[in-house]
């Protein structure tokens, strides 16, 4: 069971942004920048391109809705989307508030917001959902 499946099961807490019967969005606890959000299918599948077509399409539509809420909350030029697929063996997309192309680099440099900052940010994004 992946860490994301444990989050879906409620075994590990998260800063939830949105949830449907099939998908979950939450703030990344090791964000590249403020507002870095993960969107996942609740069904545990390692590789995003192994998802059934309807589940993959639904994930993108779900991510679009989440991205619009993040964009309303976090000042940025636009929201970028990335699929890396190596760090957690559970299909997911990263939504990243961008100001430049350099913001899209996964360099291992992370911000360290406090729990209070994460809770406030999650609540602000939810209010804009």
Image (cartoon, rainbow, N blue to C red):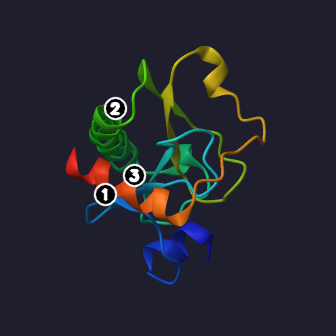
Left or right side of 123 for 98: right
Tell me if residue 11 comes above or below residue 58 in the rendering: below
Q: Position of residue 98 (x, y in %)?
A: 51, 24
Q: Residue at x 55, y 60 (%)?
A: 45
Q: Residues within 10 Å of mark 1 (few under 14, many from 20)?
A: some
SS assignment at label 1: helix
Q: CA distance from mark 3 to mark 1?
A: 5 Å
Q: Earlier in the sequence, mark 1 or mark 2?
A: 2
User: What residue sits 36% from the left and 39% below the top?
Assistant: 60
Mark nearest the camera among 3 and 2 is: 3
- Whether residues under marks 3 and 1 lie with C-beta atoms below 8 angstroms apart, the answer is yes
Q: Is residue 129 visible?
A: no
Judging by the rendered image, the residue that carries numbered circle 1 is 123
Is residue 102 at all visible to an observer of this figure? yes
Residue 126 location, x and y as percent? 26, 53
Dot 2 alpha-carbon crowd within 10 angstroms: few under 14, some 14 to 19, many 20 or more: many
**In the image: residue 74, left or right of residue 28:** left
**Residue at the outermost right position:** 108
Q: Quadrant of the N terminus?
A: bottom right
Rendering quarter of residue 74: top left
Of callouts 3 and 2, which one flags the residue occurring earlier in the amino acid sequence? 2
The residue where tag 2 is placed is 71
Tag 1 near tag 2, CB within 8 Å: no
Which of the labelled discs sits on residue 35, or is there none? none
Q: CA distance from mark 1 to mark 2?
A: 14 Å
Closer to the eye: label 1 or 2: 1
Which type of secondary structure does the marked residue at label 2 adopt? helix
Would residue 106 be found to the left or right of residue 52 on screen?
right
Q: Which residue is mark 3?
A: 121
Gap in angstroms between the C-alphas marked 3 and 2: 12 Å
């Amino acid at each position: 069971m992946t860490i994301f499946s444990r989050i879906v099961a409620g075994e590990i807490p998260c800063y939830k942004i949105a949830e449907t019967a099939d998908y979950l969005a939450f703030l990344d606890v090791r964000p590249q920048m403020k507002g870095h959000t993960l969107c996942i299918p609740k069904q545990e599948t390692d590789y995003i391109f192994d998802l059934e077509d309807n589940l993959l399409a639904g994930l993108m539509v779900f991510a679009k809705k989440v991205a619009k809420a993040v964009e309303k909350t976090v000042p940025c030029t636009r929201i970028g989307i990335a699929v890396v697929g190596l760090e957690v063996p559970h299909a997911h997309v990263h939504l990243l508030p961008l100001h430049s192309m350099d913001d899209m680099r996964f360099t291992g440099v992370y911000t360290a917001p406090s729990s209070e900052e994460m809770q406030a940010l999650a609540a602000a994004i939810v209010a804009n959902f």
